[in-house]
Structure formats: structure tokens, C-alpha cells
Image (cartoon, rainbow, N blue to C red):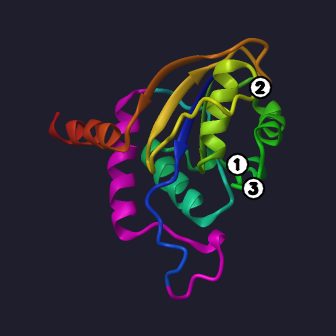
């Protein structure tokens, strides 16, 4: 199974007027534009994704909507509470057990949860001495044997937001 950990795009600041809580922070216009380019880059990878799972927070849901539209997977988009920022790696993995039979899952969420999840998948245990930071719009691919993993997974790639957007730009020029 391949898990693609995608951090949400650029969101408005928490102290922006009209924003009452962290959960209400939407993507900025720049964040939307960049995620559209990144989504084209993901499409260019040619992977047959089985589903897109997202945090219920607005900025993650908007990111997932953009990606699902670009990949033609609107019907395969689901919100799961295990991807919310206040969740834990253990809760996320428990929530993913029902997707055990899938081959390629995109998980759209937040730092530090995504980074902590990546570390757990790669080390087979919690390890606060290792940090895998995903920038906003960044994505990595980790292959695991099962959920929860029976052995440490393999990091196949980690792309910065700019690299994913450049893939999208190349798709336009091809």
C-alpha cells in the first residue's frame, strides 16, 4: 500500500479579521492558485489513486477538493477525523484500517501530524528525535505492508511544493 501524505495549501493567518478559530482558516487566493498547479503535477504522475482522505478543517478540505477535481476523484473524497490536527498517529492509523484493501491513498492534513505519521511509518515506532517536515503543499510517498504497518515502510519520494508545481507547469507545456 502506498500512502501519499499531502499538507494543505497556504491558508489565511489565524489572526485574520473574521476568523474565530483555527478550523475556519480557508486557503488564500495564492494558496488556491498554487494547489491547482500542484494538482496538475499530481495528475502528471499518472498514479491511479483509490481515494483522497482529508481532515475536516476548511483549508485541508479545500486542498482535497482541488486535488480530487484535477484527478477526477470527487466521488472518492472522504473526510476522516483522524486527519484533524488534534488527532494522533495512533488514531489516524486506526481510522485507516478500513482502507486496508486500497493501493494508493492520498491523505490531506496538517503538520505536525503528517510528519509524525511519516516518522512512525518509516521507523515502525514513535520517534521524536526525527522530524519529517512537509511544507504547505508538499507531498511524500511512503510504501507500507499493511495498516498498521508490520514492519518499517519505505520512503519513495518527498516533493517540495515547488517541485510538485513544476510538474504541473511541465504538463501544460507538453
Q: Position of residue 113 (x, y in %)?
A: 66, 45
Q: Which residues are magenta?
A: 17-46
Query: The C terminus lies in which quarter of the figure?
Result: top left
Q: Is residue 52 visible?
A: no
SS for callout 2: loop
Q: According to the image, label 3 marks what residue?
A: 86
SS for callout 1: helix
Residue at the extreme front:
129
Q: Position of residue 106 (x, y in %)?
A: 58, 37
- Nearest to N terminus: mark 1 or mark 2: 1
- Nearest to N terminus: mark 3 or mark 2: 3
Residue drawn 67% across the image and 54% down it: 55
Residue in the foreground of this view, choosing between 158 and 78: 158
Q: Is residue 39 left or right of residue 20?
A: left
Q: Is residue 32 left or right of residue 108?
A: left
* Residue 90: in magenta span: no
Q: Quadrant of residue 38?
A: top left
C-alpha separation, residue under disc 1 versus residue under disc 2: 16 Å
Q: According to the image, label 1 marks what residue?
A: 83
Q: Is residue 47 left or right of residue 44?
A: right
Residue in the foreground of this view, choosing between 172 and 114: 114
**Which label is found at residue 37?**
none
Amino acid at each position: 500500500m502506498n500512502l501519499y501524505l499531502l499538507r494543505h495549501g497556504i491558508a489565511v493567518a489565524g489572526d485574520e479579521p473574521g476568523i474565530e478559530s483555527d478550523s475556519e482558516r480557508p486557503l488564500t487566493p495564492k494558496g488556491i492558485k498554487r494547489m491547482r498547479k500542484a494538482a496538475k503535477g499530481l495528475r502528471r504522475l499518472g498514479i491511479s489513486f483509490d481515494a483522497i482522505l482529508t481532515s475536516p478543517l476548511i483549508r485541508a478540505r479545500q486542498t482535497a477538493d482541488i486535488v480530487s477535481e484535477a484527478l477526477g476523484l470527487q466521488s472518492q473524497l472522504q473526510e476522516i477525523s483522524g486527519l484533524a490536527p488534534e488527532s494522533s498517529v495512533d488514531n489516524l492509523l486506526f481510522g485507516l484500517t478500513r482502507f486496508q484493501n486500497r493501493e494508493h491513498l492520498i491523505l490531506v492534513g496538517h503538520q505536525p501530524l503528517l510528519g509524525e505519521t511519516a516518522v512512525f511509518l518509516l521507523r515502525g515506532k514513535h520517534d521524536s528525535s526525527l522530524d519529517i517536515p512537509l511544507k504547505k503543499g508538499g507531498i511524500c510517498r511512503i510504501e507500507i505492508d499493511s495498516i498498521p504497518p508490520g514492519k518499517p515502510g519505505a520512503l519513495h519520494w518527498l516533493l517540495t511544493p515547488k517541485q510538485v508545481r513544476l510538474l504541473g507547469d511541465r504538463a501544460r507545456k507538453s
